[in-house]
Image (spheres, rainbow, N blue to C red):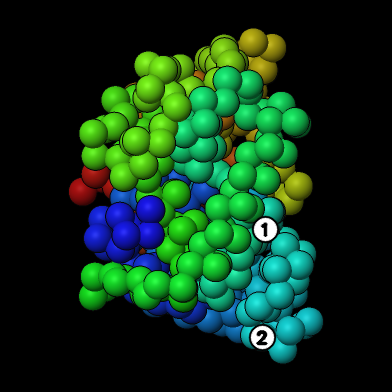
Amino acid sequence: MLEWFAHNARDLPWRRTLDPYAIWISEIMLQQTQVKTVIPYWQRWMRELPNVAVLAAAPEQRVLKLWEGLGYYTRVRNLQKAAQHIVATHAGQFPRDFDAVLALPGVGRYTAGAISSIAFNAPAPILDGNVIRVLTRLLAIAESPGEKATNELLWRLATRLVEAAAAHSSPITNHSSLLLSGSCSALNQSLMELGATVCTPQNAQCLLCPVRAHCAARREGRVDELPNLGPRAAATSREFHAFAVEHSGKFLVAQRPGGVVNAGLWEFPNLEVTGTHGAPAASLEQLLQFAARCEPLCVVKHSITRYRITQRAFHIRLTRPPDDLGSQFRWLALPGLHALPFSSAHKRILARLAETSR
C-alpha cells in the first residue's frame, strides 16, 4: 500500500503541505463533498484565512461567504469556534496531541485521526466510508458497518494497520509534489485513496488494486455486495416557492435567524408548499398584495440528505413597498446581494436573477 500510494496519489493541493491548519480545513471541507468541488474552495480559503488566528478573528459573514455553496454550514461554524478555542487554549498553535485535536468543536474520531496522522505521523487510525469499503471487502465482512460490534472491529483493524505502518522502517519514495510526514500518514492516505479511486462503490477496478491478491471479497465474487449498508431510506420530495421581490431596482432578502438550519445566511422570501406547510407568512401575504407583475424566474432542484427539494422562483415587481416587514429583511441592489452569503439554492436563484437583469 505504501509503495502504491507513493506512485499513484492524486496531486491535491493539501498534499503539498504539512501545515495542520491547512490539513484540518481540507478534512472538514471534504466531509460530504467531492474533491473536485473542494479544491477551489480550499485554495480561496487559504488565501483569505491563512492561519488559525485570522480565522478566529474573521467576521462571521466573511467566513460564511467563503463557505457559500459547500452546504452543511454547521461545519464552518465549528471551524471558527475551534479556531477561537485554539487561540484561547493553545496560544494559537494547532495542537499536536490527539486528545486535544479530538476536543475541538466539529472534530470526531476520524477527523482527529486524519489530522494527527497526516500532519504529525501519529499512529492514529482513520475510518471513513472509503476505508470501510476497503476493509470490508479485503476481509469479506458481511455484517453492517453501522452495527456497533462491526464498527468496533473495523476500528481495531484500522488501528492494527497504522501501528504496523509506524513500525515500517524502509524509506518511502514519493513523487515531487507529495509531502509525507511519515509511514502512518502514507498508510492512512493510501487507504482513503484506494477507496476513492480503485475500490469504488460501483465498478471497482480490481485489476489495478495493489492488494487484490489478499482480497477475500474478490476471491468469493462478492465485491459488489460489500460493504453491507442495508436499504437506503426512501427519498422525500419537498417543494418551496421563492420570490425575488423587486422595487426601484432593489430586491428584498432576509437573514435566517440563529438556531435554525443555515442560520446567518441570506435568502429570498419563500415558503414551503408541500404537505401542511402551505400557508404563507403574513409578511409574504403583505408583499403579494402590492405585486404589479409576477413572472416565473427559474426552478432549482437539489438534495439534502434524504430530501429531494424543488425550489420554484418567481420575479415579482411591486407598485410600492410594504410599510414594515421586520428587521430581518433588507432591500439591496444586485451588487449588495452578491456580497452576502446565500444558501446554495438561493445563490443559484440570485445567479439567474442577475442574468435576467442584464
Q: Is residue 152 left or right of residue 51?
A: right
Is there any visible trace of residue 214 in the rendered image? Answer: yes
Q: Is residue 178 left or right of residue 333?
A: left
Q: Position of residue 356 (x, y in %)?
A: 24, 40
10 Å crowding of disc 2: few (<14), some (14-19), many (20+): some
Is there any visible trace of residue 313 in the rendered image? Answer: no
Q: Is residue 288 left or right of residue 302?
A: right
Q: Position of residue 279 (x, y in %)?
A: 67, 18
Check disc 1 and report its element: helix, strand or loop: loop
| Residue shown at the point (44%, 49%) measured from the top left | 192
Mark 2 vs mark 1, foreground winner is 1
Image: 356 above or below 49: above
Q: Earlier in the sequence, mark 2 or mark 1?
A: 2
Image: 69 above or below 94: above
| Residue shown at the point (36%, 42%) measured from the top left | 211
Q: Amino acid at mark 2?
A: Gly
**Of residues 47 and 127, which is closer to you in this image?**
127
Please tell me the numbered disc located at residue 92. Answer: 2
| Residue shown at the point (24%, 60%) measured from the top left | 7
| Residue shown at the point (47%, 34%) measured from the top left | 138
Q: Position of residue 318 (x, y in %)?
A: 45, 36
Image: 179 above or below 126: below
Please tell me the numbered disc located at residue 107. Answer: 1
Q: Amino acid at mark 1?
A: Val
**Of residues 296 and 100, which is closer to you in this image?**
100
Q: Is residue 334 left or right of residue 65?
A: left
**Of residues 94 and 280, which is closer to you in this image?**
94
Q: Position of residue 67 (x, y in %)?
A: 48, 58
